[in-house]
Amino acid sequence: MIHIQNTKQNKSGPSPYLSPVAVWALSFGCAVGWGSFVMPGTTFLPIAGPWGSVIGLLIGAAIMLILGLSYRVLMARYPDAGGSYTFAAKVLGSDHGFLCAWMLLLTYAAIIWANSTALSLIVRFLFGDVFCFGFSYQIAGYTVYMGEVLLSVAVIAAACLVCVAGKRFSAFVQTLCAILLFAGIAVCFVTIVIRRGGLGDITPAFSSQGKPFSQILAIVLLAPWAFIGFESISHSAEEFRFRQKKVLLILIAALATGALAYIMLTLCAAAATPDGFHNWSKYIGVLSDIDGIRGLPTFYAAQSSMGTAGLIILGVASFCGIFTGLIGNMIALSRLIYRMSADEMLPKQIGKLNKKGIPSRALWSVAIISMIIPFFGRTAIGWIVDVTTIGATIVYAYVSICAVVVGKREKKFSTLLFGAIGTVIAVTFAVFYLLPHIQSQSELAAESYMILIVWSVIGMILFRMLMRRDKSRLIGKSTVVWIILFCLILLVSVSWVNRTTLDHAKQITQEVQEVHTDLAGQAGLEPHNDSVRQTNRFLGERFNEFAQTVRKNVFILGGLLLGSLLLIFSIFSIIKKREQLIEAERHLAEETSRAKSTFLSNMSHDIRTPMNAITGYTALALKEEGVPESTRSYLEKIDTSGKQLLSLINDILDMSRIESGKMELDPEPADLIEIFDETCHIFDIQMQAKQLTYTVDHSDVKHRYAVCDKNRLNRILLNLISNAHKYTPSGGSVSVKLKELKIHGKDRTYEIIVSDTGIGMSPEFAEHIFDSFERERSRTVDMIQGTGLGMAITKKFVEMMNGTITILTEQGKGSTFTVRLSFPPAKKDEVHMPVEHTEAEQTDFSGVRILLAEDNPINSEIASMILSQEGFIVDVAENGQVAAEMIERTDSGYYSAILMDIQMPVMNGYDAARKIRAMTGEKAQIPIIAVTANTFENDKHEAFDSGMNAHIAKPFQPDELIATLSEYVSSK
C-alpha cells in the first residue's frame, strides 16, 4: 500500500537541529565540491576563457536562484523530509513523486561517488603515486589501484560515521568544512590578486572557440552541473529550527558563495601561467599532456604565488570541498530514502530512524553501495556523474511545475510566474542535453546515455512491482509520468545512437589519416608535407561535415519522434477523458439503479401492506352470511378493482426491475405441455362466458421436457392469451398452439402461436406494441382496461430467454403473436412434480396452534380471522425478537408453524428465522413461512437463505395461505 504521510503528524520523525548557518553549509557544501578545483582548467577556460566563464557563472547562479524560489515556496508549504520527491508526490501525485525520486537517487549517489574518487585523483596530481600500490587493473583505459580504492572507501566510511555520530556533530563538521573551503579559496585568490597587482592583464578575455555569446551560453548550460546540490537542504526541511522565511536568504547566500568560489578558482587558474607559456590559452591548450602540480592550474597558481603554504591551504580547502559534498549528499539521500520508505516506496526497515532520530540504516546502505563503486575506476564513474545533469533538469522541472500548480491553486501570481519561468528554464536545459546538435559541448559520452537508459528501465520495472502490491491504488494513476519516461528513454536512445555513430566515424577517420600518413612516408613524403597535411585536413573536414549531417538528422528524428509522441499523448488523453466520463456515468447509473431499486422495494412493501388489508377484509366480508346483495355486489367490485390494482403494481415493478437489470431467469427442468395446459385452461371459463371459440393444441410437441424458467414462460402465455381474450369480441375465436420445430445444437426450438379474430391493430400502433405504457387510442380500446405494460414485459421476458416475438395484425380482422424459444432438453425424472392438495379445503385444523409474527395490527387481525375460520389457534408476536423468545419459552411442538413478516421493528424476520434455526432440538425444525410485502426475487432468496420454508406475497389469497400451511402442518 502506497501512501503519502504528513510528517508533521509523525511524532517519531526527525527532530529540528539545523541552524541557518548549518543549512547554508549544507547547500554550499553540496554545490561546490571537487569539480571547482578541476573544472577551471578542464572545462571553463577552454570553453569561454576567464571573463566568459565569470559572466556565464554569474548568469548560471541567477538562473539557479529562480529555481530556488520555487523550492522556497514549496518548503514553506510542505516542510517535510524528501524535498523534491515530497513536493511532486503531494502536488502532482505518487507517480510523479516516484519518477522525481528515482532521478534524485542516481543524482545524489553519483555526486557521492564522484567526490570520493576525486580525492585519489587530486592526490595523484599533488603527491604522485603515493597511493598507487597493491593490486591494479584497467577499466576503460583508467588504471585502478587498490591503494586508491582503499582511500576512497576510507573517506566514504569517515563521512558516514560523521553523519551517524549525531545530528549536531555532523552539522558542526559540515559547517566547519564549508567555512574552511570558502576561506581557503578566498585566501588564495586574494593573495594571487595582490601579488599580481590585479587581474586586468589576464588575456585573452575569451576562448578562441566561437563567439563570446556562444561561449557564455556554454557556461550557462553547465549551471545545473556546477550548482547541483544547492537544493539538497529541501530534504532536511523538517529539521530546520528556524522559520521558513529565512530559507530564501540562505539559498541566495549559498548560490552567491558558490558562484564566487568557482569564479575565484577560475581566475586563479587563468592568472598563474607557468614559464614557457605566453598566456593561459597556450597553457590550457596542452594541459592534458602535463603531469604533477602543473597539471592542475588552480593548485599551481596557489603554489606559485604562496609556495608550500598556498598548496597546503588549497589542499585543505579541496579536501573540505570533497568532505562537505559527501556529508551533504549523504544527509540528503538518507532523508529521501527515509521519506520514501515511510511512504512504502522502499522497504520500511531501510528508512527506520535510530534513537537519535537519524536514518542510520539508510546512511549505511548508501555508504556500503558507494564503497563498491571505486572498484570500477574513475572513467566509469565519470560516465555516471555526467548523467546527473539530465536527472537534475528533470527534478528542477518537476519542482517548478509544482510551484505553478500551487500558485494557481492559491492564486499567487508571483509563485505562478517564477514557477513558469523555472519550468521553461529546466525544459530548455533538458533540450540542450538531449538534443546535442544545438550545442556540442552538452554532448555526453555514449556510455552515459546508456546508463540513463538502463536506469530508466530499472525504474519502470520497480514501479511495476510497486503497482502490484499497491492495494490503495495511489500509484499508476498518471499516464503522463510514463509518457515522460518513455520520451526520455527514446530521446536518450537517439542521442546514444548519435554519439556512438560519431565516435565510430571519428575513430575510422583518424585511422584513415594515420594510414595515409604512413603510406605517404613509405612513398618518401614527410608527414608535414603540404600534400599530406591537405589530405588529412580534407578527411577531417569531411568528418566534421558528416558529424553535422548526423547531428542534424538526429535532431530532426528526435523532433519528429517527440512531436509524434505528444500527438499520441493528446489523443490518448482525449480517450482517457472519455473513459473517465463513461466510468463516472456508469457509477452514476449504478447509484441511480440502487436508489431506484430501494425506492421500488419500499414502494412495493408500502403499497402491498394496505392492499393486504383491502383484499383481506373484502374476502372476510364476502364470507359473512346475510350480506345484502347490493353490498355483496359492491364488495365483489372492490375485490376485482383490488386485483386489477395489484396487477398494475406487479407490472410496473416487473418492468422497472427488468430495465434496471435486477431480474434474472431461474431455469429448471420442467414439463412444457403441463405448463401449457395449466396456463391455457385458466381461461376456459372466461372464454365460455364471452362465447369465444377457444382451441388449445400441442400435438406437434414430441419432446415435452426442457430446462426453462417456468414462471416467466407462464407469464408470457398469460399475457398473450389475456390480450387475445380482452380484444376479441363475443362470437370470435382464440387459438393457442405449441409446436416443436427443430434442434439447434443441443437445444430444442419451440414455437408458441396465439391467434385471435379480434379488433386487430393499426400498422402505426403495431410498431409500438412492445413499448412501455403504449395503448392504441380508439373508442373500443378505451373501454377495455389495461396497463400498457403486458406486451412490453412479454417481449423483455422473451429477449431474456434469447428468443424472438413477432406479430401479424390487421385492423378489424385480428392478430397473431408468434414466440420462438430454444431450451436445453431435460429428462422426465429431473422434473419436479408439484404436490397436489386436493384435500386441503377439507382438512381439519382445529386446535392447531400457529405463531403469527406481524407488527401491523390490521394485517395481524386479518390473518388471525382467516386462520381462526379454518380452526387454527393464533398467537401474535409484534416483532421477530418476541417471536423467537416465545418459541424458546414454549415446549417443542407447541407451535405447528410460524407465519413470519419480514420488515418488523427490533428484529426483522430474517434474523428471527436464523435465531430460531440456531436453537436445539425440534424447535429448530419448526416450519417458517414468510408472509411479506417484500416480493422481489432477492427477497425470496434471502428468505430461503435465512432458513424459511416458503414465501407468500402480500396481499395474500386465503386459499393460497391455507394450501401452503397444509404442506407443512398436520391436522389434529
Image: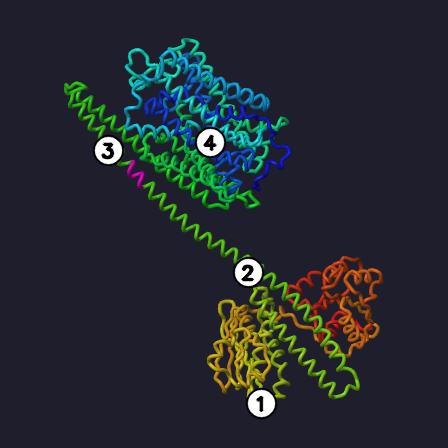
- Please name the amino acid that badge 3 sits on: Glu
Question: Looking at the image, is 603 positioned above or below residue 451?
Answer: below
Circle 4: is it few (<14), some (14-19), or many (20+) Cα within 10 Å?
Answer: many
Q: Earlier in the sequence, mark 1 or mark 2?
A: 2
- Residue that badge 3 annotates: 545
Q: Quadrant of residue 701?
A: bottom right
Quarter holding the N terminus is top right
The residues tagged by marks 1 and 4 sit, at their Cα atoms, a distance apart of: 93 Å
Q: Earlier in the sequence, mark 1 or mark 3?
A: 3
- Residue that badge 1 annotates: 730
Q: Nearer the viewer, mark 1 or mark 4?
A: 4
Q: Which residues are magenta?
A: 551-556
Label annotation for residue 589: 2
Asked whether 840 or 302 is in front, the reply is: 302
The residues tagged by marks 3 and 2 sit, at their Cα atoms, a distance apart of: 65 Å
Residue 526 is situated, as x and y percent measured from the top left of the image, at: 17, 18
Q: Is residue 146 visible?
A: no
Q: Earlier in the sequence, mark 1 or mark 4?
A: 4
SS for dot 4:
helix
- Please name the amino acid that badge 2 sits on: Ala
Q: Is residue 80 visible?
A: yes
Question: Looking at the image, is 791 positioned above or below residue 276?
Answer: below
Asked whether 486 or 76 is in front, the reply is: 76
Asked whether 403 or 961 is in front, the reply is: 403
Circle 1: is it few (<14), some (14-19), or many (20+) Cα within 10 Å?
Answer: some
- Please name the amino acid that badge 4 sits on: Leu
Circle 2: is it few (<14), some (14-19), or many (20+) Cα within 10 Å?
Answer: few
